[in-house]
Image: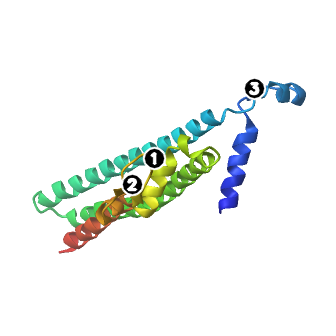
């Protein structure tokens, strides 16, 4: 797996800052390429990972809003007067919520794998520079071990409950909680 990350990083470094647009010859394209600035490359890798994480959180918020609307629809119909044909609609809303939750659990896991890949590329790029210029390495070490000691910083130790609350867990646990609640809605619809 480390070799795959190294290949991705090497490809990014070889690609360079010069991009070709349109139909240019290979000679002109290779002459236009400029060697990449390692600081700029590291900054872009970190920004890419941060942007991917923000997109994942935005998508989670979209799921929460959509499933909340389904829950409110179910509650409104459940508290309305008893009418014929109400139970199938309640079941349909509860099943829709269940399907949404199962789908978002899978999507949350998938999104986090891509985010981890982007952070791994950023970390690998930072390993190529000296320790005084690294930024993400400290965050990665704190996330992995829960402890951080550095000569210029005080020792930092995260308690177990703060290590459990990560965006990876939230991307999966929030839809899982909604899944359990929607299963309760299915049961309540039948009773």
Residue 88 left/right relative to 109: left
| Residue plotted at (28% across, 65% down) | 182
- Residue 7 image offset from top left, x and y in percent: 72, 53
Quadrant containing the C terminus is: bottom left
Q: Can residue 57 be seen in this view?
A: yes
Task: Answer few, some or many: residues within 10 Å of disc 1's Cα (few below 14, many 20 plus, some between 14 and 19).
Answer: many
Q: Can residue 96 be seen in this view?
A: no
Q: Nearer the viewer, residue 176 or 131?
A: 131
Q: Do the residues labelled 3 and 1 touch (CB within 8 Å)?
A: no
- Name the image quarter holding residue 157: bottom left
Q: Which mark is residue 53?
A: 1
Q: Are marks 2 and 1 in contact (CB under 8 Å)?
A: yes
Check disc 2 and report the residue beneath it. Answer: 167
Residue 124 left/right relative to 22: left
Task: Answer few, some or many: residues within 10 Å of disc 2's Cα (few below 14, many 20 plus, some between 14 and 19).
Answer: some
Note whether 82 is above or below 47 in the view shown.
below
- Helix, strand or loop at mark 3: loop
Q: Which of marks 2 and 1 is nearer the N terminus?
A: 1
Check disc 3 and report the residue beneath it. Answer: 21
Mark 3–mark 2 Cα distance, whole angstroms, equals: 38 Å
Mark 3–mark 1 Cα distance, whole angstroms, equals: 30 Å
Q: Nearer the viewer, mark 3 or mark 2?
A: 2
- Residue 127 image offset from top left, x and y in percent: 61, 49
Quadrant containing the N terminus is: bottom right
């Amino acid at each position: 797996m480390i070799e795959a990350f190294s290949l991705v990083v090497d490809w990014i470094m070889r690609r360079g800052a010069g991009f070709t647009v349109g139909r240019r010859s290979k000679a002109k394209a290779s002459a236009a390429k400029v060697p990449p600035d390692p600081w700029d490359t590291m900054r872009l890798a970190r920004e890419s990972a941060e942007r991917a994480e923000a997109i994942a959180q935005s998508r989670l918020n979209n799921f929460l809003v959509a499933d909340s609307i389904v829950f409110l629809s179910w509650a409104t119909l459940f508290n309305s007067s008893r009418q014929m044909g109400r139970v199938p609609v309640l079941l349909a809303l509860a099943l829709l919520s269940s399907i949404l939750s199962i789908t978002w659990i899978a999507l949350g896991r998938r999104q986090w794998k891509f985010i981890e890949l982007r952070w791994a590329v950023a970390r690998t790029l930072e390993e190529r520079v000296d320790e005084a210029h690294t930024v993400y390495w400290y965050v990665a070490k704190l996330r992995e071990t829960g402890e951080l000691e550095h000569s210029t910083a005080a020792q930092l130790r995260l308690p177990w409950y703060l290590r459990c609350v990560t965006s990876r867990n939230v991307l999966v646990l929030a839809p899982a909680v909604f899944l359990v609640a929607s299963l309760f809605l299915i049961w309540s619809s039948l009773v």
